[in-house]
Image: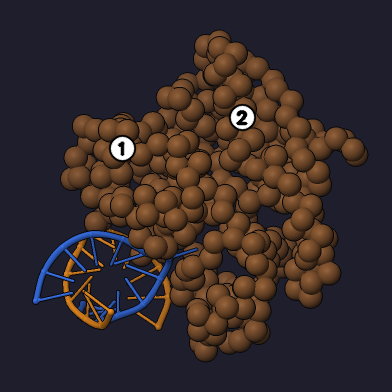
Chain colours: A brown, B blue, C orange
Amino acid sequence: MKLQLIKTIEVEATRPFNFDATFHKPDHFTSGDNYWEPGIRWQTMCWRGKQLGLKITNNSTANRPGILVNIYYNKPLAEDFINSCVNEITHRFNLDLDLSDFNRIFCNEKILGPIIRQWKGMRPGHPGSLYEYIIIGILLQNATIRRSINMFQSLLEQYGKLIEFDNKKLWCFWPPGKLKKVSQENLRALKLGYRAKSIKCIDDYFADNKIDEFELRQKTIAVQRSELLKLYGVGPATAWYLLFDVFHNWAFFDHISPWEQKIYSKLFFNRNPANPVPAEKLLQYFERYGEYKQLAVHYIWEDLWWKRKNEHIPWLEELIRI
DNA sequence: CATCAGGGCCCTG
DNA sequence: CAGGGCCCTGAT
């Protein structure tokens, strides 16, 4: 399906703003739903049931940071649809985030200071909806990266849509409810294993409107967490990712998985991965970043993955087991 | 060839 | 609250 350019919108970002560190996260696994090169991100987006193509371009001038969003579709789009879509993009990528406090407090901190100076204006965030992120989160569970990518790709090819815009062919996520008539066995045939049940349950849950992402955004983190844990297939690890990436809680840090523990141990304590610092002690260490502890670790984490793009880091390669 | 952990979670006892 | 089982892969 080839899409046409329907609308171009300028969106401002708060300053300081770093386009590439915001729109490309080297630690997120590459999937067929987006493509990045410096200054441009092509991204598919399923918004209110419509499967759109987006070309997001850096549009920053010296004193006016921002992006240009080209929206591609096969029909004209209503004004309020476009506005809501752009608001959602602003939200998901945190274009209106005020980082001044964070920058001021930590710009001279030993580890974080230099990283903040290098990546000043980087935002956390995730391009997907809550539904989409949960699906991906489930695919990440108890699997190697390669396997997660394979499972995601199979799902996209079965239930997503391949769209072409601006000379890019990218897969777009399906809307919630798409799996209504799909059986667990169908999903298992895609080699999802026991995750088939979780994904089926999640799709039903969203299709039946038992959860509202936008209402949940307004709730306290305690409510958000308990609502997420009610979902079949979502446990503490997946909830932790969601609370940061989807619900934008910068202070929440309650979970460290074994592979992350090893990387943190090396980064913060230069400890051999075979002998990592206990997770409890790491969490205690992150307390120094107070209200911004997860944002702080995100900066340090992303910095590491950007380094990996440019230099070989043997100890890291051994830990991530792609 | 077998065995086993892996970007967890659910269920059982 | 600890521990077994789960799908499938690739490493050993």
Q: Which residue is under mark 2? A: A87
Q: Are marks 2 and 1 in contact (CB under 8 Å)?
A: no
Give the image location of residue A275, x and y in percent: 52, 89
Give me the residue at 59% from left, 60% from top.
A251
The answer to whether tags 2 and 1 share a subunit is: yes
- Residue extending farthest to the right is A62
**Residue A298 seen in render:** no
Q: Residue at x 60, y 13 (%)?
A: A79
Among the two numbered marks 2 and 1 on one chain, the one whose residue lies closer to the N terminus: 2
Residue A276 lies, in percent from the top left, at 53, 85
> Quick one: SS at disc 2?
helix
- Percent position of residue A88, x then y: 57, 32
Label number found at residue A210: 1
Q: How many marks?
A: 2
Nearest the eye: A126 or A161? A126
Q: Chain of mark 2?
A: A
Residue drawn at x 52%, y 15% is A74
Quarter of the image holding residue A68?
Answer: top right
- Label 2: how many residues lie within 10 Å, few (<14), some (14-19) or many (20+)? few
A311 relative to A153 in the view: left or right: right
Between circles 2 and 1, the one closer to the viewer is 1
Q: CA distance from mark 2 to mark 1?
A: 24 Å
Amino acid, disc 1: Lys
What residue type is disc 2 on? Asn
- Chain holding disc 1: A
